[in-house]
Image (cartoon, rainbow, N blue to C red):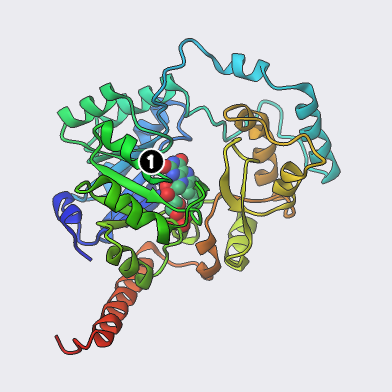
Amino acid sequence: MQTELSRKLGVEHAVFGFTPFPAVAAAISRAGGFGVLGAVRYTAPADLERDLDWIDAHIGDRPYGLDVVMPARKVEGVTEADVEAMIPEAHRRFVRDTLAKYGVPELAEGEAAGWRITGWMEQVARSQLDVAFGHPVRLLANALGSPPADVVARAHERGVLVAALAGSARHARKHREAGIDVVVAQGYEAGGHTGEIATMVLTPEVVEAVAPLPVLAAGGIGSGQQVAAALALGAQGVWLGSVWLTTTEADLHSPALTRKLLAAGSGDTVRSRALTGKPARQLRTEWTDAWDDPAGPGALPMPLQGLLVAEAVSRIQKYEVDALLGTPVGQIVGRMNSERSVQAVFDDLTRGFERAVDRVNRIAGRSGQ
Ligand SMILES: Cc1cc2nc3c(=O)[nH]c(=O)nc-3n(C[C@H](O)[C@H](O)[C@H](O)COP(=O)(O)O)c2cc1C
């Protein structure tokens, strides 16, 4: 599964893997793909430094990338406390009441909420970049919007490629104008923040819109047949996020959540604002139902919602409250039915890809070629 882009990056397979787990990122690159570590959870630069050191020590001579959430527009002088102060009391009460209804215990005294979405803040994302540029990161991806011009310039000075996610051809053109090198066309069926256009429709639209820039197809890809389809649509590779969540290298800290993912079907996700305030695909739970219910207060805009629910999400995860327990994941969760190593996922992808190519060759009357 080689393309011009995979050859440029020196990887065997044009399979890019987004993951919040360093061990998974390293395993993806070791298996011949391109691992990309998600940095949004790292609010302390020292933690990111530690985990990139770990990757450097365990990845051999394989390349890898980092994904940050860097806003293109600067918001000067806004602190987390300023954002907290904007949260209405009625929303805080709704969180308290919902947790009480399900009997979710409190965190221990002094125990910090594990997942605060502050990686979106300009200063946090910039401190992540300062760390990243001290490591042999080969690709920098930006989740929400085009990265600022000075960041693109800084990456290019160091020979680092810049990628950005796009949910529409219009977004993709904006990225091209911002001088980025790779567009990730992410369809509606993807886990995490998504737009409204399906991968099958979006990929060729984006390929045409930004040609000759390379495009990676993302959203709903979990088999080699789907990789073949994406490459047939003009993509130079695929970008997978969900499938790694149930690999043996992933560290979800919750056996109950792993069980839920393995049992879920492709119809068990929802695109909800419950987690961050922007539509993000995730497991449908009674928590997402509560936020999506028109009778409730509804989610606040980003970044308020993320701050509002951070502690609640930590409590739900820590105590594995089954009815409320969820995670961002895409519709491909329907075929994530067993825990496998990252290498086993790659073996399956390459086998499926070969089968798909054989099948298409037979249909085209080219068998034996
Ligand atoms: C648990 C999870 C967290 C994600 N977080 C981010 C993120 O922080 N930044 C980002 O660029 N994309 C994020 N994504 C989206 C992935 O980068 C990727 O585009 C998406 O997972 C591809 O679709 P798939 O889920 O069908 O494989 C996340 C996806 C998942 C499943």
Left or right, 11 with respect to 333, comes to left
Tag 1: Cα neighbours inside 10 Å, few (<14), some, or many (≥20)?
Answer: few
Spot occupied by residue 237 in the image (x, y as percentages of width and height): 28, 57
Work out which residue is located at the far top of the displayed protein and give it.
77
Identify the image quadrant of the C terminus.
bottom left
Q: For the residue with label 1, is its CB less than 8 Å from the closest atom of ligand 1?
A: no
Residue at image location 31% in from the left, 39% down from the top: 173
Left or right, 121 with respect to 31, comes to right
Residue 99 position (above or below residue 235): above
Q: Amino acid at mark 1?
A: Arg
Q: Observer-nearest residue: 238 or 321?
A: 238
Spot occupied by residue 49 in the image (x, y as percentages of width and height): 34, 31
Could you say which quadrant of the image residue 364 lies in? bottom left
Assign a secondary structure to mark 1: helix
Identify the image quadrant of the N terminus.
bottom left
Spot occupied by residue 271 in the image (x, y as percentages of width and height): 60, 49
Q: Observer-nearest residue: 53 or 74?
A: 74
Query: Does residue 180 appear in the picture of this structure?
Result: yes
Q: Which residue is mark 1?
A: 170
Residue at image location 50% in from the left, 53% down from the top: 188
Residue 311 position (above or below residue 149): below
Query: Does residue 241 appear in the picture of this structure?
Result: no
Residue at image location 62% in from the left, 26% down from the top: 304
Spot occupied by residue 47 in the image (x, y as percentages of width and height): 42, 31
